[in-house]
Image: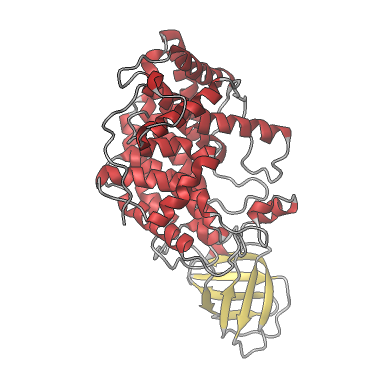
């Protein structure tokens, strides 16, 4: 069953909206809501900060994180909705509201003046709408203002290009995960903003390759705990040998389990170090415990370690993201998919359609048919989740948290918007849509809701 709101045959100008909901059709009712939110935002002070600080912060109650979150709300919620409303005021026979434009410009110039980009992917993914609105309103800035904004975007470009994907304390393994997806989304926007076509196309090629490890089903490049035959063991050197070069997987402090060894060497061992013997193509694993005897045989089983393995298990579904596998949370399937959808929209056409279709289908299937009483992060392998739990951030660790489907509202609206651009008759599952329209209580979804509702004509 599809949902239809009919044709928007009589769009009202902003000044013509009545003060009460009498005789308003669906589209005009939503224009009134857009006006209401924008009017509220006009009264708020700008919220730019010099440095965004949220990534890697388990304790979200600090003043630095709270200031950044106020900035996030301005970037994610207020600025794009103000821009949508401003665009609307100049359409359908209306006159563009100069006061709204002044507010939009003040917000953008505030950030361009005060903010010093660091390149942090998770913090600065929030620049998505700042870049989008600045590009849309570019002609409304004078040359001096344009120079200021361009200088800030160039600083952001440099920060992104020089960013090192080294986990902060407690963040666990970043390789192949959502940090990259959010990073690529913003960098792609930066290249588009600056008109760097060759950089833009080269980055798309990088993203093509990244997709295969971000959704790792069947990808051998993504490492997870394996079992290998023990081909040698030495008591005096306290080591086991296996065939092949697996040096990077055996991290000091990690764990291996030996089973089926007839020389009495079965048990759990802590890794001291490892080396690779190129001449014989063997990996030699030195352990802290003493072996019972010399002699190979049996099986060596790896135990997951975040510094030695990308994921704790092999992917079982083509749409399953590496973040979901690591974190055991639909929150992260959604969080990885959101920037993928924006990348797909930036790239245009069907370039990433299969990727986002598979990822969305995996997410929606698990939302609509959830495992019985499955708590978010119950089997997470990332120490950051435990750290967040330790400071009582209960949304991120079981047994307190279950996934709330309305939290995927932005994803539902963006996916619907993207798919309708390819297939106008497309409609997501009605149950998902019903959950998504609860965005009345989720301000972070309003921009995405209005973008879908009006087909992007207001931004």
Task: From the viewer's perspective, tell me whether residue 91 is left or right of residue 363.
Answer: left
Residue at image position (57%, 61%) is 308
Residue 354 image offset from top left, x and y in percent: 31, 54
Give the position of the N terminus as an image quadrant.
bottom left
Is residue 360 visible in the rendered image? The answer is no
Up the image or down, 389 lies above or below 101; here it is below
Is residue 10 depicted above or below 43 in this figure? below
Q: Which residue lies at the image location 25% right of the left edge and 45% below the top edge?
A: 424
316 vs 54, left or right, is left
x, y percent for residue 350:
27, 47
Quarter occupied by residue 237: bottom right
The reply to whether residue 53 is in sight is yes
In this view, which residue lies farthest toward the front? Answer: 22
Q: Which sits in the foreground, 353 or 222?
A: 353
Question: Residue at point 41% right, 33% down?
Answer: 29
Q: Position of residue 218 (x, y in %)?
A: 39, 66
Image quadrant holding the C terminus, namely top left
Whether 118 is drawn above or below 251: the answer is: above
Q: Position of residue 172 (x, y in %)?
A: 62, 53
Front one among 405 and 379: 405
């Amino acid at each position: 069953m599809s949902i239809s709101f009919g044709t928007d045959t009589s769009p009202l100008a902003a000044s013509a909206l009545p003060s009460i909901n009498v005789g308003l059709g669906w589209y005009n009712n939503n224009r009134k809501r857009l006006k209401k939110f924008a009017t509220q935002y006009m009264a708020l002070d700008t919220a730019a900060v010099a440095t965004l600080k949220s990534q890697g912060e388990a304790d979200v109650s600090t003043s630095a994180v709270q200031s950044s979150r106020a900035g996030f709300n301005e970037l994610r919620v207020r600025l794009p909705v103000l821009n949508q409303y401003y665009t609307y005021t100049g359409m359908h026979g209306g006159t563009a509201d100069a006061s709204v434009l002044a507010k939009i410009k003040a917000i953008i110039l505030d950030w361009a003046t005060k903010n010093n980009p660091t390149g942090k992917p998770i913090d600065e993914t929030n620049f998505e709408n700042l870049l989008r609105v600045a590009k849309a309103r570019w002609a409304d800035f004078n040359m001096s203002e344009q120079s200021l904004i361009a200088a800030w975007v160039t600083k952001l470009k440099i920060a992104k290009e020089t960013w090192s994907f080294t986990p902060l304390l407690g963040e666990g393994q970043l390789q192949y995960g959502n940090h990259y997806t959010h990073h690529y989304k913003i960098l792609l926007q930066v290249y588009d903003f600056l008109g760097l076509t060759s950089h833009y196309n080269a980055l798309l090629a990088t993203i093509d390759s990244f997709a295969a490890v971000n959704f790792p089903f069947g990808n051998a490049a993504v490492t997870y705990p394996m079992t290998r035959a023990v081909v040698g063991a030495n008591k005096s050197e306290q080591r086991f040998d296996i065939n092949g070069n697996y040096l990077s997987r055996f991290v000091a402090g990690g764990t291996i389990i030996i089973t089926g060894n007839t020389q009495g060497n079965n048990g759990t061992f802590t890794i001291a170090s490892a080396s690779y013997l190129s001449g014989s193509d063997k990996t030699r694993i030195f352990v802290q415990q003493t072996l019972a005897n010399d002699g190979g045989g049996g099986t060596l089983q790896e135990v997951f370690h975040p510094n030695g393995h990308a994921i704790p298990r092999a992917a079982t579904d083509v749409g399953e993201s590496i973040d979901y596998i690591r974190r055991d949370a639909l929150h992260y399937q959604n969080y990885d998919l959101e920037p993928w959808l924006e990348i797909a929209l930036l790239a245009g056409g069907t370039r990433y359609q299969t990727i986002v279709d598979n990822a969305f289908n995996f997410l929606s299937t698990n939302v609509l048919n959830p495992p019985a009483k499955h708590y978010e992060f119950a089997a997470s392998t990332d120490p950051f989740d435990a750290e967040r739990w330790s400071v009582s951030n209960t949304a991120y660790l079981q047994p307190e948290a279950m996934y709330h489907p309305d939290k995927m509202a932005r994803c539902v609206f963006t996916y619907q918007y993207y798919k309708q651009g390819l297939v106008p008759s497309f409609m997501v599952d009605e149950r998902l849509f019903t959950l998504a329209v609860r965005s009345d209580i989720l301000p972070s979804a309003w921009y995405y809701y209005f973008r879908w509702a009006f087909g992007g004509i207001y931004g």
